[in-house]
Each structure stands twice: as structure tokens, then as C-alpha cells.
Image (spheres, rainbow, N blue to C red):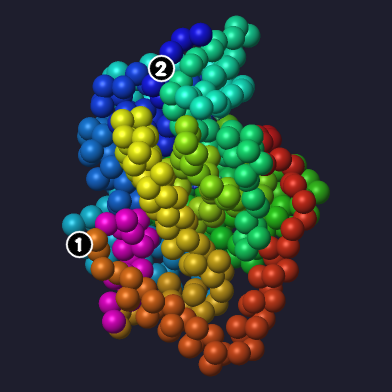
Amino acid sequence: MEACDVLVIGGGPAGATAAALLASQGRKVVMLEKAHHPRFHIGESLLPANVALFDRLGVRDQIERIGMPKWGVEFVSPDHDHAAQVEFAEAWDKSMPYAWQVRRSEMDEILFRNAAARGAQAIEGCRVREVRFDADGADVLAVQDDGSRRQWRARFVVDASGRDTFLSNKFKAKQKNPRHNSSALFGHFRNAERLPGKLEGNITIFWFDHGWFWYIPLADGTTSVGAVCWPHYLKSRSKPLKEFFADTIAMCPALAKRLEAAELVDDAVYATGNYSYTSTHCSGERYLMLGDAYTFIDPVFSSGVYLAMHSAFEGAEVVATSLDQPARAADARQRFEREMRKGPREFSWFIFRVTNPTMRDFFMYPQNPFRVKEALLSLLAGDIHGKTPIWRSLRTLKAIYFAVCIVNPRRSWNAWRRRQRNIRDLGPLAGENILEAK
Ligand SMILES: Cc1cc2nc3c(=O)[nH]c(=O)nc-3n(C[C@H](O)[C@H](O)[C@H](O)COP(=O)(O)OP(=O)(O)OC[C@H]3O[C@@H](n4cnc5c(N)ncnc54)[C@H](O)[C@@H]3O)c2cc1C
């Protein structure tokens, strides 16, 4: 049995950030990652609020080198004859105008190696199998690629296992989100058409009948394209994934046009099953859950990596308090629980309505009375945990939304009914996690 202060399960953005911060405090940190970096991961579009976090970790230059600058978002709707462009520079706080699109294999490796460089023992090919808590800490059992077992005695455990939700499963704390339900199909394309000049790196969101598409241009010339669709649509598939994906793209003529000359890289198409969930709690006396290990919301606003890294910054402070000042740990955990619910809650209000025609109009014709556009862009930039005073304007925007819904009762009622039908629970799809099919 080896000993450590903190054992981190998972070396993705949340785990590697937490491990780097805790190791920098001089603690003995062990981070176990079941895969080997660079490993594939989806989730390639970052938010401007990420930039400050990379800065604080000392990796901003490295991320800049692999990233495609993303200055804003383009929205394309089948019901409007124009595309809408918004720029982060128009947000409330003008000092965070851009983010990057990244290959996650590259970004996650940078974060993982950074944690090791800061003193964390970062072990790959080592899957945590069991954690047993007692009053002073936990025994952690892990199995390496060659089948050998290793055990650690840890004073504190940080679960950053992503959608594997290691501790949430153990505590039966995982709950399906009853208000949302979606699934995704995605692949990478060569020779996809790009927007001109500075717009080239922007993410495009295309709405279509069964949900929406992301279109994420990467720095190496490939473009990540994904359909986030209702589970009943994915379940209706009766042909190979690649053909089904091609048919789905054909349902969105504006996207199909951009892909006219493009070819699928390696013929690889991926699908993920239903994936919005939360956990009843994210902390205990000897553990925390970070990032996707705690909750996952729909990716339409590219919030996942930011929320995961932000949770690691907050979480590292809670771990330090729990280890150094146990008398203050309960308060720190309470604050952490509140903070962890805030981001998903604020994004979710818009996520639940993003396919609603009223909300779509807001994105297609962005207006700025009472600074509502600036506030919304700040939310889209991830600027929700600082002091930017966007909340009154966001409440105004929500009030305007309800007022517009009320004056269009038939449209609103139909949209509500359609959504209820679309998010209905059909049981598990092909799997909770990512499957690959060619
Ligand atoms: C279809 C889709 C599209 C998305 N698009 C975006 C986007 O555009 N922008 C964005 O910001 N986010 C996006 N996301 C979300 C984003 O991918 C996640 O929110 C983000 O990766 C969370 O980081 P994490 O560190 O919590 O988890 P992960 O990145 O999943 O890292 C968890 C790590 O833990 C390891 N692990 C798991 N179990 C164990 C174990 N038992 N032992 C050891 N290691 C283990 C895994 O191998 C993995 O490396 C998307 C997600 C999906 C599904």
C-alpha cells in the first residue's frame, strides 16, 4: 500500500487541473488515468473564460500553439434566410474576446503533463476499480494495463472520472436529468468549407428538425461536425452509423453545402447515448466529484471543459481546507456544492429552450435593450463566476422571452408539446458512453 495526500481518479481537464494545483501546494498527489495520452475525447470548443484558467495553470502559450482562435459563434437556422454572427468582444466584459478550438487529445495531454511537471505522480494505463472510505481517508485499488494491482492509502479522493462517474455510481447518486434528453453523432471532415478571415475559427450552430449540429474548425485543417439529436431520432436508425450520419447531414442543407467537397476522416463516425445527468451531491468528508464526474449538461454552449476546469480550481481549495483546517471543511463543502450547481443551472435555462422558435429568434436577431445581448454573450463566454454584473440583464432577457411566448400562444404551445415528445425517456440507447462505428 502506497500513501498519498490526494488521489485523483481520471486525468482529463478536471483531474489534471486539480492535480496540478494540489501538487503546486506541495502535497503528495497521485493521478490515475485509465487511458494513455494522447487519447481521443470529444468536446473541442472552448470558452473565453477558459483562457484565464490556462493562464493560472501556466499553459496558455502551449494551448495557443495547438488552438484555432475562436472569436465568436455563428447561428444558422432553417427558418431564417441569413446567418447570425456574434462576437465575444461584444460581451459585457470586453477583455475576454476569444477562446480556442482544440484537439482534445492534444489539450488534455498538455494539462496532464503539466500536472506531472508540477510534482503530481501521473500514472497512465491505470484504472481505479475500488475505493473504500473510512474515518481518516480511503483505500484505493487500481489495476494496470498488464493486470497488476496497485493500492494507495489516500487522505482525500478527488473523482474526476468524467462520464464514468465513478463515485456517483458507487453512492447511487447519479440521476438522469428529467428536463433534458439528447444524444450525439459525430465525425471529423477534411476539406470542409471555412468562413473567411477572422471568422474561420468560429463555431457554427446549425439547427435542424431533430436538434442541432456543431461545426468546429480545428487548427490542423479538419472540421469536427456533430449532430446533437433527440434520442428517439437516434433510436430510429436502421442502417450503419456512417450512412445514418450522412442522411442526418442531408437534412440540414446549409451544413450539407459546407461539406460538399469534404470527406470523412478515417471513415469514423461516433455516437453517444443519452447523456444529461446530475448527481445528488458532489462532496463528502473525504471526497469531491469534479466536472463530468458530477454532472453533464448538453454541449450546445461548449461549457463542459470550462465547468470541469473551474470545478477543479474551486475543488482544490476545498481539498486544502479539508486537509489543513478540518473545522472549516463543512462550510467550504457547502459553498462548493452551491458553486457546482450554479454553472449548470445558468446554462441549462438556455439549453432547455435552445430549440424553441422564440429563443432561436433571439439568437438570429440579437438586440441589446437593457444590455441583454451583452449579458447573454457573457454567459456564452463562460463569464459567470466572476464579478461581471450580468444577472439583472439576464433576468430581463428571460422576462422578454416569456412575454414573447405569451403573445405567440399557439407557437409556444406547439413548441412546448414538441419538446415534451422529443425528450421522452426511451431507456438506454446503445450505451451511455462513446461507441465507434465505421
Ligand atoms: C457530444 C459531446 C460534445 C461536447 N462538446 C463540447 C465542447 O464543444 N466544448 C466543451 O467544453 N465541452 C464539450 N463536451 C463536454 C466535455 O467533453 C466534458 O465536459 C469534459 O471533457 C469534462 O472533463 P472531465 O475532466 O470532467 O472529464 P473527461 O474529460 O471525460 O476526463 C475523465 C478522464 O477520466 C478517465 N477515467 C475514467 N474512469 C477512470 C477510472 N476508473 N480510473 C482511471 N481513469 C478513469 C478517463 O479515461 C478520462 O480521461 C462535449 C461532450 C459531448 C459528449
* Residue with the mark numbered 2: 4
Where is residue 133, by image quadrant? top right
Check the image and name the residue furthest to the bottom.
407
- Residue depicted at x 26% and y 68%: 389
Frontmost residue, 21 versus 186: 21
Q: Is mark 1 within 8 Å of ligand 1?
A: no
Frontmost residue, 362 versus 321: 321
Which element type, helix, strand or loop, lies under badge 1?
A: loop
Amino acid carrying mark 2 in the image: Cys
Q: Position of residue 363 (x, y in %)?
A: 43, 72
Q: Position of residue 65 (x, y in %)?
A: 27, 34
Amino acid carrying mark 1 in the image: Lys
Work out whether 89 lies above or below 115.
below
Residues in magenta, as a range:
370-386
* Residue with the mark numbered 1: 94
- Residue depicted at x 29% and y 61%: 88
Check the image and name the residue furthest to the left.
95
**Residue 406 visible in the current orientation:** yes
